[in-house]
Image (cartoon, rainbow, N blue to C red):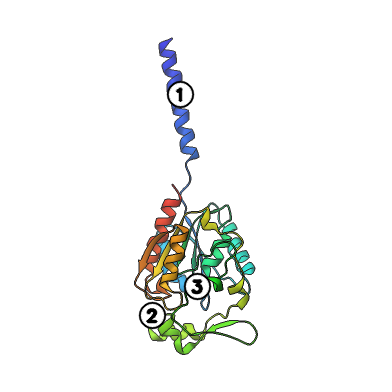
Amino acid sequence: MNKLNRIVTALALSFAAVGAQAAAPAPVKNVVLVHGFFADGSGWKGVADILTRDGFNVTVVQQPETSLADDVTATTRAIDARQGNSILVGHSYGGVVITEAGNHPKVAGLVYVAAFLPDAGESLKDLADRIAPATKGIQATADGHLYFDPARFHADFAADLPAADARFMAYSQVMPAVQAATTAVSQAAWRSKPSWAIISTADRTVSPELERTMAKRAGSKTVEIDGSHVAFIAHPEKVARVIEQAAAAAGK
């Protein structure tokens, strides 16, 4: 009888172990990258190449920047297209987008790169008005769009890139709708999802002080990079490392 009890106990423990393994969360291998104002998805190439080399499935969202709702829809579409959970990464205004889109059940974590982290009821403009950036290069068109003055683009947006690269970015920049900057987030995903924030210490487009303040409020794990607003282009290895750390932590 004792022998039978031992066998039954052993089998029960074995089944319990199998059940625990089955219940363990799967590693997060999907990364969705969201660009910000005055840029497009091509800026993520360096980061995407590193992540792909390291075994991640990368999607770069080319959101239209016609409205926050349109941009969230484009991002949600990218999340839905992947099997399994994703890490959602946003640069600059992309942080606003992932704050809303990150409420999707298949988002395991959020990474903000020199980005805005609004709370519910806050817009990009609300946050920028609290601590103004150093640049004066952001201008409005007569028909309700924004652009970055090409004469200031290199110094204030992409100072750690070669001048020729910054010049091309300035000439090919996306002009977002003003309403994308003034629309408030309805629900902040960082309140229920783990988040990481990369602070660009030489950023002149978003105040580094504002970046730190927002990250602290969100309880984000914070890393600082000595770089401009486009540090993700100039320092892709450092940015990719944070994303991979987020994926590893979110998959536990």
What residue sits right under mark 1 in the picture?
11
Q: Pointers 3 and 1 in contact (CB under 8 A)? A: no
Mark number displayed over residue 139: none
Q: Which label lies toward us, 3 or 2? A: 3
- Answer with mark 2 or mark 1, whichever residue precedes in sequence: 1
- Tell me residue 144's x, y (percent): 63, 82
What residue sits right under mark 2 in the picture?
161
Q: Pointers 2 and 1 in contact (CB under 8 A)? A: no
Q: Which label lies toward us, 2 or 1? A: 2
- Answer with mark 3 or mark 2, whichever residue precedes in sequence: 3
Query: Is there any visible trace of residue 165 in the rendered image?
Result: no
Q: In the displayed image of the protein, which residue is found farthest to the top?
A: 1
- Tag 2 secondary structure: loop
Label 3 sits on what residue type?
Arg
Label 1 sits on what residue type?
Leu
Spatial CA span between label 3 and label 2? 28 Å
- Tell me residue 178's x, y (percent): 61, 78
